[in-house]
């Protein structure tokens, strides 16, 4: 009986230790889960430290933080809707792949990991279940969609005679804006996530001096406001930033005075535009800085938020008010910003 009692005691002790270890592991796992920023931040790439890396900074340019440290090129950051993850592209594996990392730069994981294939410009779906990106898997750029874990990749444009790039998911998840030259010029298109019903929004774009159509304006880098009503984009050849309704109407240049403006992205509330420009040194100068434009005023106000003359780009603006905030039930997605605004 004494031996049995000891055996029982030892077994009970092992059981208690096992449970304690399991609980400690669970607490540790919870403690290291990725967390979203508690304030607005802008993700971008820059070579300010000598190599193209991913950074985040406050919306006034303060507190820049370098998230990637790698001799390769890291660019194309995209916040997940919850703000806990950032997807980006990198050629650290020999060719460009889509990576994902925690918002603080930890746990960098290669999602595509495909040899001899160029995968770039990721963008998260609003429900955080999928990532759209451009890929040369077929020998030319098409828009692909994969699950957020890198599985189930599929080509949704599959246009052998054109170049499809820079996908941007609408806030309701029902539309993807992208760049395509399928009509002969690079324009902003929209389509359903399965690739159906593509439509050119900027085919008749006025993008030249005195209202003249600029041949080969190269409209690119679409960016949605959180309400899905507006799209901001850049015209690469003319170095201008534009905003338009989601149906392509009411296009206007954001900052009338030319300053070689490019790589624009809109804040979720639609009130501000972040972009890079060389407004301090004129044509031919490569000393680009980052500016934020307040577009709520009759005369747009500009604020320069970086100093140093380094290239920046691929801006993505995160605002915790608009973050994915409530667990999904079926396909319903709730955002604090939409609750707050009664959207």
Image (spheres, rainbow, N blue to C red):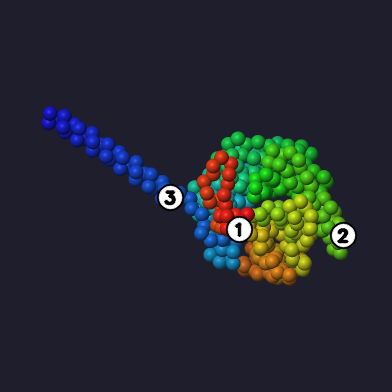
Say how many tags the image has: 3
Quick one: SS at disc 3? loop
Residue 310's place in the image compared with 173, above or below, is below
Which residue carries the number 1 mark? 341
Left or right: 72 in relation to 156: left
Which disc, if any, is residue 212? 2
Rounded to the nearest angstrom, the CA distance separating label 2 from label 1 is 39 Å
Q: Secondary structure at mark 1?
A: helix
Inter-mark Cα distance, 2 to 3? 55 Å
The x and y percentages for residue 29 are 41, 46
Q: Of the two numbered discs 3 and 1 on the same chain, state the one appearing first in sequence.
A: 3
Name the residue beneath numbered marker 3: 32
Q: Which residue occupies 64% across, 63% down?
A: 310
Q: Residue 111 location in percent, x, y? A: 57, 41
Q: Residue at x 77, y 62 (%)?
A: 253
Quarter of the rendering occupied by the C terminus:
bottom right
Q: Name which of mark 2 and mark 3 comes first in the sequence.
A: 3
Measure how far apart labels 3 and 1 are at the Cα level. Answer: 32 Å
């Amino acid at each position: 009986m004494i031996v049995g009692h000891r055996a029982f005691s030892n077994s009970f002790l092992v059981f208690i230790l096992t449970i304690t270890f399991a609980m400690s592991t669970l607490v540790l796992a919870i403690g290291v889960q990725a967390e979203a920023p508690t304030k607005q931040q802008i993700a971008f790439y820059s070579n300010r430290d000598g190599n193209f890396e991913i950074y985040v900074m406050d919306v006034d340019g303060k507190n820049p933080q370098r998230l990637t440290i790698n001799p390769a090129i890291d660019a194309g950051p995209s916040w997940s809707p919850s703000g806990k993850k950032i997807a980006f592209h990198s050629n650290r594996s020999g060719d460009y792949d889509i990576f994902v990392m925690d918002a603080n730069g930890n746990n960098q994981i290669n999602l595509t990991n495909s040899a001899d294939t160029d995968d770039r410009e990721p963008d998260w779906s609003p429900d955080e279940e999928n990532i759209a990106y451009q890929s040369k898997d077929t020998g030319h750029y098409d828009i692909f969609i994969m699950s957020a874990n890198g599985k189930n990749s599929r080509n949704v444009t599959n246009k052998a005679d054109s170049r499809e790039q820079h996908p941007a998911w609408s806030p309701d998840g029902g539309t993807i804006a992208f760049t395509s030259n399928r009509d002969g010029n690079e324009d902003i298109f929209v389509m359903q996530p399965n690739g159906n019903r593509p439509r050119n929004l900027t085919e008749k774009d006025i993008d030249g001096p005195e209202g003249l159509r600029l041949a080969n304006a190269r409209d690119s880098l679409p960016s949605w406001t959180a309400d899905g009503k507006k799209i901001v984009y850049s015209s690469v050849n003319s170095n201008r930033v534009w905003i338009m309704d989601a149906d392509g109407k009411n296009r206007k240049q954001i900052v009338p005075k030319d300053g070689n403006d490019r790589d624009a992205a809109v804040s979720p509330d639609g009130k501000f535009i972040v972009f890079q420009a060389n407004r301090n040194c004129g044509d031919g100068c490569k000393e680009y800085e980052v500016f934020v434009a307040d577009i709520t005023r009759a005369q747009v106000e500009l604020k320069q938020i970086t100093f140093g003359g380094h290239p920046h780009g691929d801006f993505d603006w995160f605002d915790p008010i608009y973050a994915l905030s409530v667990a999904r039930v079926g396909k319903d997605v709730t955002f604090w910003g939409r609750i707050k605004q009664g959207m």
